[in-house]
Image (cartoon, rainbow, N blue to C red):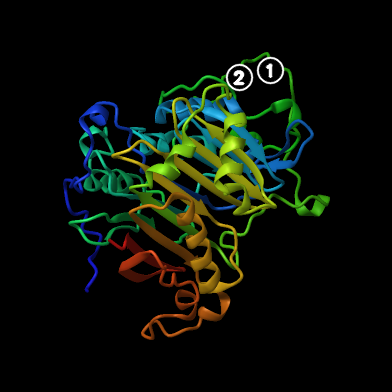
Amino acid sequence: MAPILSSSSHEPAGEQNVSVEIPDAYAEGAFEGPEKLLELWFLPNAAATQCVLDGAFAQHGLRAVRREVWDAMLDVVRCKVLNMIQSEYVDAYLLSESSMFVYPHKLILKTCGTTTLLKALPAVLRIAARIGLDKVWRVFYSRKTFMFPERQEYPHSGWDCEARYLDDLFIDGSAYLVGKISADHWYLYLTAPRDNCLREPIRLDDGQAVEGDILSMADCPFTDIAALNRADPFHAASSDDGFTLPPTPTSEEGVEPATLLLQPEEDQTVEILMTGLDVEHARRFYYRPGEKEGSEGGKRVDAETGLDKLDPNAQMDSYLFVPCGYSMNSLRGANYSTIHVTPEPGYSYASFETNVPLAGGSKAVTELVRQVVDIFRPSKFSVTVFKSDSPKDAGADADHQPMPSSNAYQVGQLADWRRSNCIRYEFEGYHLNFYFFERWS
């Protein structure tokens, strides 16, 4: 069966509803579970701010941005921070509509419902420029088919609209539709790696004000003074600030600037998007009388479902909503996992995403998928494995397909589901494997 894969055409202009059957009792309040996922990689810059906040972990780059500024940015998206955990390498924000992960030079934002994620891009770009990260190295944006596309607001009213919105900001972008157009499919937009894929330089004086300063100035000894003194809607500094910042130290002074590898040797992301959850399995994600909303209920769900066993060495932050619904972030070093569940019958949905390295290749990926889908027992699900080229692939002949890294992370057959779609694609620096499974009838 030949897969459908279209590039750069921004088609279809509209978006099809893929026959989601909603009971009348739920139709009006049906929730859009499928998320929009944005990942921005900024070019490391020696002038980027380095800070230590609250004496916790060494923080610099985007991790030095104050919470109030992220809150203001998320107001544009229409979601709120519920909780935050951190490791030495990354901050994980649990949101009212999914998650955000902040690395020094990388931001991952995932939001569900009718959130307007892409509208936050101008604010995110200004925040980054404000601390010296004014060049974007790479952009990734993806999502599955919406259940209720007619409820989405601009610029999410259709894939064509989203792709054009991104093209207005970035150069060398390509838009793809992966999968059967008449069934569940997956959309991807990405830019080619380059020193700066921004179409225009970031302006810090466009008049869109956000209250609050970006940095905890008292705790930040090393800052790009030129950038700090520019007019900036995110910096409400007055003439009475009362502090003087020293110049950014150089390597000759014995302090190296903040750095982060643009592309780790083994950068991979596995995402599992599930619909039609088994009713009995979905009941575990409902609030129960007597338990507390939030972390307490989340811990009950973790233990009862076995989600706490997927990565037992990770730091978990889970949340149970009232009357139902569940979200979880977990961190292990520089790696994260995140799960979000909408359990209501008729439009149930669950997602799992992780960038934790899987040393066992295809066998490990297949086992991970099996463990996740056994918890939810969906009627349908897709799997995307997005993996960077390994160093040994760098000299491979592009005419010889598939490359080793693509083959090494295949998802094998699963006992209770039929694999109806398998698509492999090569991008500059990355491989994508896409799979679609349906439960045997």
x, y (%) of residue 430?
A: 45, 67
Q: Mark 2 points at which residue?
A: 237
Q: In which quarter of the image is the C terminus?
A: bottom left
Residue at horizontal 40 percent and vertical 60 percent from the top: 383
Where is residue 6, by image quadrant? Answer: bottom left
Q: How far apart are marks 1 and 2 (CA)?
A: 6 Å
Kind of residue indicated by mark 1: Asp
Which residue lies most toward the top here? 240
Residue at horizontal 49 percent and vertical 51 percent from the top: 375
**From what the image shows, is residue 412 above or below residue 337?**
below
Q: Is residue 305 left or right of residue 398?
A: right
Report the disc number at residue 13. Answer: none
Residue at horizontal 41 percent and vertical 49 percent from the top: 198
Q: Quadrant of the N terminus?
A: bottom left
x, y (%) of residue 230?
A: 55, 30
Residue at horizontal 54 percent and vertical 30 percent from the top: 70
x, y (%) of residue 89?
A: 67, 48
**From what the image shows, is residue 64 above or below residue 82?**
below
Q: Mark 1 points at which residue?
A: 241
Q: Nearer the viewer, residue 349 or 429?
A: 349
